[in-house]
Amino acid sequence: MLVDRLISDREGSASRNFIMSALFWSLIGMGAGLLAAMEFSFPDLVHNVPQLSMPHLRMIHVNGVALGWLSMGYVGVMFYMIPSLTKTKLWSERLGNFTCWAWNAVMVGALCTLPNGFTEGREYAELGAVLDTIVTVGLISVAMNAYMTVVNRKVKKLYVSLWYFLGALFWFPLVWIIGQRTFVALPGLNDAIVGWFYGHNILGMWFTTVGVGMMYYLMPRLTNNPLYSHGLSMLGFWGIALFYAPTGTHHILQSPVPEWLKAIAVISSIFLLVPVMTVLTNFFMTMKGKWQMMVTDLPLRFTITSSLFYLITCTQGPFQATRWVNWYLHFTQWVVGHAHLALLGTFSFITTAAIYYGLPKLTGREFYSQGLIRAHYWLKTLGFGLMMTSLTIAGLVQSAGWHHAIPFDIWSIELAPYWILRSISGIMIFLGQCLFMYNVCKSLYSKEAKLKAAAKLQAAEVKG
Amino acid sequence: MKGYRLGATGIIVTFFTIITATVLLPMVLFNPKPSNHGNTYKDTPEAAVADPERGRRIYVREGCFYCHTQFTRKQDRGYGPLVKAGDYVYETPHQLGTARTGPDLTNEGGKFPSEWQKAHLVEPRAVKPGSIMPSFSFLNDTDMNDLVAYIQSLGNNRPVKHYVEAPEEYQEFLAKKKVDTESDAAANAGRGIYTQNCAACHGLDGRGNGPNSISLEKKPANFTRAFFKQYPDDMWFYRVREGVPGTRMPRFGMTLSEEQMWYLVAYLKTLPKDTELVVNSIDQVNKIQPTRLPRLSNQLYEPATGGHEGGPEHPAGEHHSPPPEEQPPAIDSQNSVFKAPAKTAPSSETHGTTGGATGTTTGTTTGAETGTTTGTSTSTTTGAEHGTSTGTTTGAGSH
C-alpha cells in the first residue's frame, strides 16, 4: 500500500510530484542565492559557518536552481505536455514517480554533501560520483518514459514541441555523462574544454530546447491562434541542433586553448542568431492580433515576458561571444547578469507559465488567488529587472576598472551599491517564489480547495 | 515512426559529429608540453612545512574558484606574465574560474608574505579594507597552512633553475661605472629617465602595468617582485642596455648614454619589495611598506665628482642619515610556520645611507640643509614624492 502511495500510477501524479518537488527546491536554491547575494554586501553576515560561506551557498544555489527547480520543473511539465500532445497516457506513471523520488534523493544528497565540502571542484558539475550516477539513471528513465509515450501516440504527426523535448532528452543525458568527468582526470585545459562543452550545453541542449518547446506549446494553446509557420519552427530546431553544441569554448576564449576550437565556438555562437530569430519570429507572429490577452491571461503574460527576455539574452549572447566584446566583458558581473537573464528571466518564467497553465488542468483545482499570481509576476519581473540592471552596470564598472589598470581594491569598493541593489532584487524574486509556493499549496491542499473540487465533481456528475 | 527516421538520424549524426569535433578531437590534438611554470606544487619553499597539494584540494573544497580566476589575459595589467597552455598540464580539475569577483591569482605566490595571506584569510577586512571576501576562519590550522602554501606556490615566483647572468664583458662596464647605484640621489636622477623611457610599459610604479602592457604578448617585468632583489648591477645594466630577447623591450643602449643607464639602474634597484618580511600579528601586517622608494633629497647628483668614490668611505654617522628602518619583527618560531625563504636577506635596508656622497664634494652646508628637509619629507608621506621627483628629473637631465 505504501508503495502504491509513494510510487502511484494515478494519471498525472508523476507530473504533479515533479512540479511540487521543483517548487520546493526552488525555494532552497533561490534562498541560497539570496543569502549569497547578501553576503556580497555584508561579508560577515554569517561568520564561522563553513556551510553558509559564499562559495558553498553558490554551489547550493546553482545546483538547487538548475538541477532542482528548473530540471525537475521541466520534467514535470514534459510529463504533462507530452501525453497531451500525443493524446495518450504517460507510458509509466510508476517509473515517473520512481524517477521523481530518485531525483529528490539526489537533491537531498547534494544539500548534504556540497556545503560540507564534498565537491568535485568543477563548475556546474560539483556533485560526487554516486549522485552523478543517480542523475544519469534518472535522466535515462525520463527519456525512456518520454520516448515510449511518443511511440504509443494516437496522433500521427509530431508537433514541434515534441521534437524539442525528444531532442533534449537525447542530448542532455549524453552531455551530462560527458560533462561530469567523474571517472576521468584530464589535464588542465582539456578538462576546461570538456567542462565548458558541458557547462554551455546544459543550457543549450536542455534548458533552451525544453524551454523553447514549452513556449511552442503554450503560445498557440493560450491564444488559440495556430502556429505561424511549421517550416520556420523546423528551421529553428535544426539551427539549435547544429549551432548550439559547439559553442562551449567561448567561455574560455582568452585562455591558451587551440585557436581553431575558439573559431568554431565564436562562429557557431554568432550563427545562433539564426535559430533564435526564427523561433522568436514564429512566436511573435503567432501572437498576432492577440497581444491584448497579455493583460488578462496570466500564464500568457509569463510566456510573453519569458520570450522577450529570451530575445534579450540571445542577442546579448552571440555578441558577448565575439572576441572583442568578450575581451571587454569576460570575467565581469555582466556575464552573471546574462546567465540570470537566461535561466531566471527566460526559463524560470516559462516553467512558471507552464505550471500556472498546467497545474489546474492536472489536478482539476483552480488557483487559490489570481491576485497572488499577479503579485508573483510583478515581484519577479521588477526584481529581475533590477537585478539585471545592477549586475550589468556592475560588470561595466568592473571591466572599466581593470582595463584602466585601477588597482583592484579601489574599484571593487565602487561595486557596493550594486551588490545592495542585487540583494534587494533577490529579496523580491525570492518573495515572489514564496507567494507562488503558497498559492500552489493553498489551491491544492487547503480545505476549501478540496471542498470546491468535490462540489465541482458533484456538479459534473449531476450534469452528466 | 518511419517518417521520423531521417530526423532521428539527423539529430544523432549531427550531435556525434559535434562531440567528435569539439570534445574528442581536442583531446587528441591538443597535448601541450608542461612549461616551466607548470605547477607541480613540489618546489616551493613552503612545501617543506606544509603541503601545497593538499592546499589545492582545500582551495577546490572551499570553492575559491568561483571568485578568483587563474588565467591572465593579454589585456590584464599587473597580473604578471601571460599564461601558456603548458602551465596547466597538472591542473585537474581546472581552476580557471569564470568571474573575477576577487583578483586573479595566477601569479599570487610571493606577492604577499605568508602571514599576510593567513591574516587575510582569517580577517580579510582587517588587511584589505573594503574587501568582500568571506572569512575563512573556520579552517583549522593545518588546512590554513596548506592553503597558504598552495597560494604561495602559484605563479612565477617559484625558484628558478637557470638564472640569466650578464655576459662577461659587463664586468668592464661595471669597472668603469662612475655612478653610485646605491645612492638615493642617483636613484632620483634615474627616476626621471625611468618615467620618460620605461613607464609606458612598466608602469609608473614599476609593476609592469603601464598602458602599453595591454597590447604586449610578453608582459613587461614587474620590478616590485622580490625576485629582482637578487639582480646585481651588471645584470640590470645588461637588461637595460641590450633589452630582453624575444620581447618588445628595446635596447636602450642605442638611445641612452651609459651614465643615464646607470642612473636608471640605481632607480630600478629601489623597486623590488621585501616580501620575505614575516610578521606575527594582524596589527603588524598593516605596517609592511609595500614599496620602498628612494628617500627624497633636494641634492642634485653631481656625476663628475660624486658616485662611488665618495660613497663607501663616507662616514656612516652623517647627520642626515635616516633612522634605521624598522627591523622586521623577529620570527616567532612557534607561531609562524612559514619562515622567510632564505633566498634573499633583506639586508639592503640600509643602502640609502650612502646617499650623502655629494656632501663631501659640494660642501657640508648643503648636506646639512638637505638633511633637515629630507628627514621631514620621508617621514610624512610617500604621495608627495611624485611632485618632487619631477623636480629632480629636470635637474638630472640638465646635468
Image: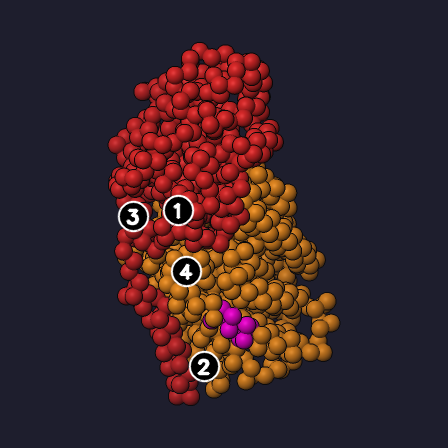
Chain colours: A orange, B red
Q: Amino acid at mark 3?
A: Asn
Disc 2: host chain: A
Return the residue at label 2: A153
Mark 1–mark 2 distance (CA, rounded to whole Å): 76 Å
Return the residue at label 3: B36
Mark 4–mark 2 distance (CA, rounded to whole Å): 37 Å
Q: Amino acid at mark 1?
A: Gly
Q: Residue at x 38, y 72 (%)?
A: B18
Mark 3–mark 4 distance (CA, rounded to whole Å): 26 Å
Q: Position of residue B168 (x, y in %)?
A: 27, 39
For the magenta stretch, what is the residue range? A268-276
Question: Sequence-wise, which precedes: disc 4 or disc 2?
Answer: 2
Question: Sequence-wise, which precedes: disc 3 or disc 1?
Answer: 3
Judge if badges 3 and 4 mark residues of a common chain: no
How many numbered marks appear? 4
Q: Position of residue B95 (x, y in %)?
A: 38, 49
In terms of image quadrants, where is residue B14? bottom left
Q: Amino acid at mark 2?
A: Arg
Examine the rendered structure and indicate whether residue A13 appears above or below residue A419: below
Return the residue at label 1: B243
Mark 4–mark 1 distance (CA, rounded to whole Å): 40 Å
Mark 2–mark 3 distance (CA, rounded to whole Å): 62 Å
Instruction: Please tell me which residue lies in front, A199 or B20.
Output: B20
Judge if badges 4 and 2 mark residues of a common chain: yes
Mark 2 touches mark 3? (CB < 8 Å)? no
Q: Which quadrant is the N terminus of chain B positioned in?
A: bottom left
Q: Amino acid at mark 4?
A: Trp
Residue B49 vs residue A124: left or right? Answer: left
